[in-house]
Image (cartoon, rainbow, N blue to C red):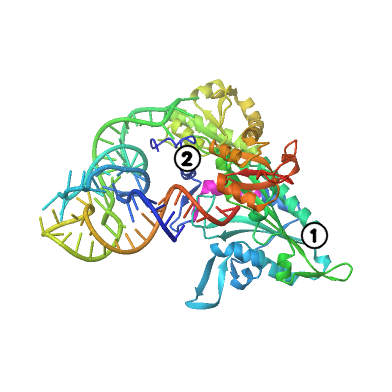
Amino acid sequence: MADDKALTPRSEDFAAWYNEVVLRAELADYSPVRGSMVIRPWGYAIWENMQRALDDMFKATGHENAYFPLLIPMSFIEKEKEHVEGFKPELAVVTHAGGKELDEPLVVRPTSETVIMAMYAKWIQSYRDLPLLLNQWANVMRWELRTRLFLRTAEFLWQEGHTVHATAEEAEEHTRRMLGVYRTFMEEWMAMPPVTGLKSESEKFAGAVRSYSCEAMMQDNKALQAGTSHFLGQNFSKQFELRFQSEAGTEEYAWNTSWGVSTRLVGGLVMTHGDDQGIVCPPRLAPVQVIVVPIWRNDDQRQAVVDKAEAVRAALAERGLRVRVDAREHVTPGAKYYEWERKGVPLRIEIGPKDLEKGQLALAKRVRGEDEPRKEFLPEAEALATVAERLEAFQSELLERARARREANSHRGVTSIDEIAEIMDAGGGYVYTGWSGDPAVEQAVKERTKATLRCIPGEEFRSGTAPARCVGGEKDAVMEVVWARAY
RNA sequence: CGGGGUGUGGCGCAGUCCGGUAGCGCGUCGGCUUUGGGAGCCGAAGGUCCCGGGUUCGAAUCCCGGCGCCCCGACCA
């Protein structure tokens, strides 16, 4: 980087910026084991806030948490044909334990469909046992060759929901409901507005009938698959004999869904809102929403401003806000500003001797609009009374900004593969075109443009006029699709 | 797994071509002075130069072998 203090600007090298900001905001660090990472307290606090919000939403939609084991018998993974083909290349396998070779190798879970189905088969006998709606928070392992902090690591943290339903319709509906939960979470908590839709056959989850996803656009205009929800049909039920007696007395295979989001979301948050100063935390997920920096010249002043800072913290904490006072000595106020900006704290309050005299507080917002002042000086009471609404406003601004950026970089009405290639080379973004459903066209676009079919967008994302022709040029379009280069 | 690069105090690097026993910046520690946008001065600590072998009076430097990491491609939340 240019000097030790500044980050590589995003415009110069987005990938380098991302690595630096993740390390220097102390979200994570490289671990001794290649491909795996350490999530540091600041990064983990963001994840915990995500977990809490999501967990509440899962509970509100009728789910309970459970925990299934890390190790899965190899034979389980092998039961579902597409599933094993999809995951085999990235399995880590335990072959020895207790000093002996195991009779059957154990797979470190890459996902838990198989072991969970095996247990569900034991627990479910009747339609009265349905639906069964469980979720687990866990770590999983997928042996990746090319890794990046948060975005793709060998081990990562996630949640995986696994549900069982009596009918296909109900399972399909649930699959979509959870996609909606993810979308709501991403918009309302992360201020990251995804395009949601159906995955093509080639991009769907290994073993699913249909996969849906949330595709969030990062600041380099690449898509990040930020959450997926799968309708599994009876594929796993049939392999694991997950049957139930229906109301009519017949024996039926159950219908399943699974859905997950991971610590990848933290990477998405960084790449959605971060700037050249550091990361930007949406207030609802920020580990610290308000940082209070006391400023002094001598010991008398120090005592007075630190006392005031502490009083401000207490007053805001009472209003349910997450506030911290940075009273470190031998670190100048300016250094503290940079540090907390790098870590993305949404709002800073400065308290110096002049503020004490005037009974005011200085407020600085992490991201300013063009016409907004660098700092605002407000009477203390007014400042305290408005902090919460300022944070809410900031949250909305981030969402609107991200949505505007997504739309500004979405290209509709594109009719040729050449045009997709041009757009990709000119900075990328989401490209909407018609598609016949022919996998050969999908492959051709990928080879020519490096863009992949991100999804068949849901109704509200579709263009006003449905495309008439497939982007491949030879057939009529039967649907509209979104192309983008992706993480 | 293929192609390229790189490995030197905690971090970033110079030194390697042309062999002579390791240096710079940042950080860390101590002291004093400082503190409204990345403080200053003085002092100090900290290194099996990735590993193994070879050449040489002598290797961070040359030779051979290995390993790690990074970047670029094929697969992926």
- Residue A295 is inside the magenta segment: no
Q: Nearer the viewer, mark 1 or mark 2?
A: 1
Q: Which mark is residue A413?
A: none
Quadrant for residue A128, please give it: bottom right
Q: Nearer the viewer, residue A76 or A376?
A: A76
At 76% from the left and 52% from the top, the residue drawn is: A61
How busy is the neighbourhood of tag 1: few (under 14 within 10 Å), some, or many (20 plus)? some
* Alpha carbons under labels 1 and 2: distance apart: 45 Å
Is residue A414 depicted above or below A63 in this figure? above
* Residue found at the very far right of the displayed protein: A248
In the rendered structure, which amino acid carries the disc numbered 2?
A: Trp
At 83% from the left and 66% from the top, the residue drawn is: A127
At 39% from the left and 37% from the top, the residue drawn is: A4
Most prominent secondary structure in the magenta stretch? helix
Question: The residue marked by circle 1 belongs to what chain?
Answer: A
Quarter of the picture holding the N terminus of chain A? top left
Q: Which mark is residue A17?
A: 2
Task: Please give the range of residues in magenta.
Answer: A36-52
Q: Nearer the viewer, residue A390 or A20?
A: A20
Q: Position of residue A251 (x, y in %)?
A: 83, 71
Is residue A147 depicted above or below A102 in this figure? above
Q: SS at mark 1?
A: helix
Tag 1 near tag 2, CB within 8 Å: no
Dot 1 or dot 2: first in sequence order is 2
Q: Nearer the viewer, residue A286 or A217?
A: A217
Is residue A141 depicted above or below A216 in this figure? below
Q: SS at mark 2?
A: helix
Question: The residue marked by circle 2 belongs to what chain?
Answer: A
